[in-house]
Amino acid sequence: MGDVLVHDPAMVKVGGTYYLYATAPGISIKTSTDRINFKSAGVAFPNGLPWCDAYTESDRNIWAPEVVYTGGQFYMYYSCSSFGSRNSAIFLATSKTGLSGSWTDRGKVYSTTTSSTFNSIDPGLLIDGSKWYLTLGSFGTGIYQLAINPSTGLASSTSLTHLAARGGDNSIEGATIFKHGSWYYLFVAFDFCCRGASSTYRIMVGRSSSPTGGFVDRNGVSMLQGGGTEILAGHGGIHGPGGQFILHDVDGDLLVYHYYDDQGAARLGINKLSWSGDWPTVV
């Protein structure tokens, strides 16, 4: 309830507070103590992000923040781009409090140009023991992964690992990896967002025994060959669910996402994930 108009949400819990970040000029922040009632806490960058100007053109929105809390610090990866352009970059900022105006720019993590084969947006961070991995990508040749240096939060090299792709219209983006048991799960969005109630986003998943590749769906189809098992699609007054983030909480694992209502507004969705046969389903 409360202020739940969001797009591409990421949610972390520190102490008894949930911090929700989403696409907006300056990146919106909302907080809650019960995961139901959210209130606005301003924007992460109230003075703007001039280092994004070379990528955003006339679009003032900063896209798809990914936020984790580790080592007493918030890490935020976010996308600077404009709709339909591959002139895009992912940057990192850190904060001790996660609140408005507290974020420090740590620099660019990765960028693409208009001649690149994919779009450098939609970062997703996996911390797996002492190793950090960042997923990124959109359309074109699909989803990639970068190794991240945990001491800086920046890329340890420019080498990319290819994780997933689609044929046809190449509509795949919004990737994030979540570990459950001994498996790594790659969640992605298929089809199209940003069309209000006409959006066709749907959330898909595959799994691998390794964080760096070999993801297949429940039928064994490689995600590099268009594979993916659908776990949430539009239904009733829920249109185009996507922009997903996975949060482990005291009562289980949560799928956090946006969807469009019948009027075309982007709203926050939170569902529990149930695991059966080591595959997730939405409760």
Image (spheres, helix red, strand yellow):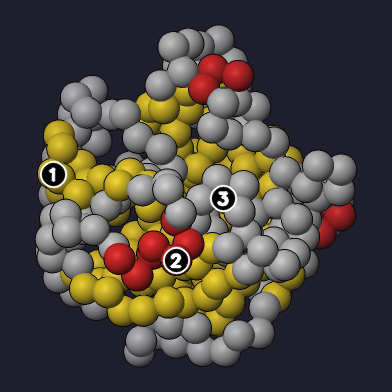
Going from N to C along the chain, the mark reached first, 1 or 3, is 1
Is residue 136 in view?
A: no
Give whichever of 72, 45 is nearer the camera. Answer: 45
Q: Which mark is residue 41?
A: 1
Q: Which numbered disc, 2 or 3, marks the residue closer to the eye?
A: 2
Distance from the alpha carbon under mark 2 to that under mark 1: 27 Å
Figure check: 236 above or below 241: above
Report the amino acid beneath label 3: Gly
- 227 or 53, which lies in front? 53
- Specify whether residue 112 is in view: yes
Is residue 252 positioned above or below 140 on the image?
above
Instruction: Specify the farthest residue to the front.
Output: 58
| Circle on res. 174 | 3
Q: Residues within 10 Å of mark 3 (few under 14, many from 20)?
A: many
Residue 40 screen position, x and y as percent: 15, 37
| Location of mark 2 (residue) | 54
Q: Do tag 2 and tag 3 residues touch (Cβ < 8 Å)?
A: no
